Image: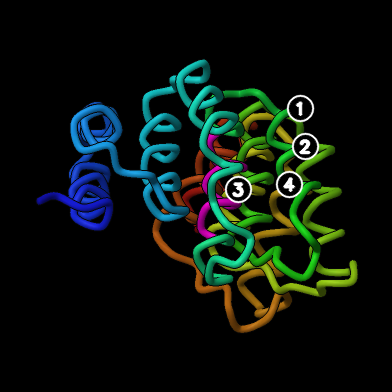
Amino acid sequence: SRTAVSWTALMAGYNDAGEPDRALECFERMIQEDRCNPDGVALAAVIKACGSLGALEIGRKIHSQYSSMVSTKSPNNELSILANSIVDFYGKCGSMDEARAAFDSIESARRDVVTWNSLIAGYSRAGDFQQAFDLLERMMQGEERLRPNGVTILSILSVCARAGLVDRGREVFSRAASSGYGSGVALRLEHYTVMVDLLGRSNQLEEAVEL
């Protein structure tokens, strides 16, 4: 018989293949046909699918209905994966109040770089550059003292491009290039692409070509 583990593997496969609608369908069948109780990893997979689909109402319902079933005695990594997926889901759906509430409900010791990146990316998508910058500072200076990685910097550069903040973007980019954020940030093609976009939008074409 099919177990929650086999359904979860299937959902993860569909998510990775860019078919979140099929992942959501698997979750519904797991509950209705096989009467399996989802664990934290299964919930994280279906909530990720809802985020990709922008299915705020469905994801919110799944979150409120099933999250309390996940035992607090579950392995820490399982709880972290679920918590991060919830922050990411609300951020992708543009519901930043709920993303922030989900973030704030996670004990600071459990927050990792992925947790912070999910919230920063949400604010970046929403064009709220002040919140994104504040979070970057808090992440590095707060009690967690976490170092940003390439994903963090990409979100910050993206929000600079959206807001036309050339000087701020340039500052972040050069700091990352000189390992000012630590060794965890390796600038990749996507960082250069966003920076060229930012400079191009602000008519700094010579500098964009030099990059």
Q: Which mark is residue 101?
A: 2
Disc 3: CA contacts within 10 A as few (<14), some (14-19) or many (>=20): many
Q: Which mark is residue 118?
A: 3
- Amino acid on which the number 3 mark rests in the picture: Ser
Quadrant of the image occupied by residue 140: bottom right
Q: Which residue is mark 1?
A: 97
Dot 3 or dot 2: first in sequence order is 2
Pointers 4 and 2 in contact (C-beta within 8 Å): yes
> Where are the magenta residues, as a range?
81-89
Secondary-structure class at tag 4: helix
Q: Which residue is mark 4?
A: 103
Dot 3 or dot 4: first in sequence order is 4
- Label 4 to label 2, Cα distance in Å? 5 Å
- Label 1 to label 2, Cα distance in Å? 6 Å
Residue 123 % position (x, y): 69, 35
- Amino acid on which the number 1 mark rests in the picture: Asp
Residue nearest the viewer, comparing 111 with 27? 27
Image vertical order of residue 171 relative to residue 19, above or below = below
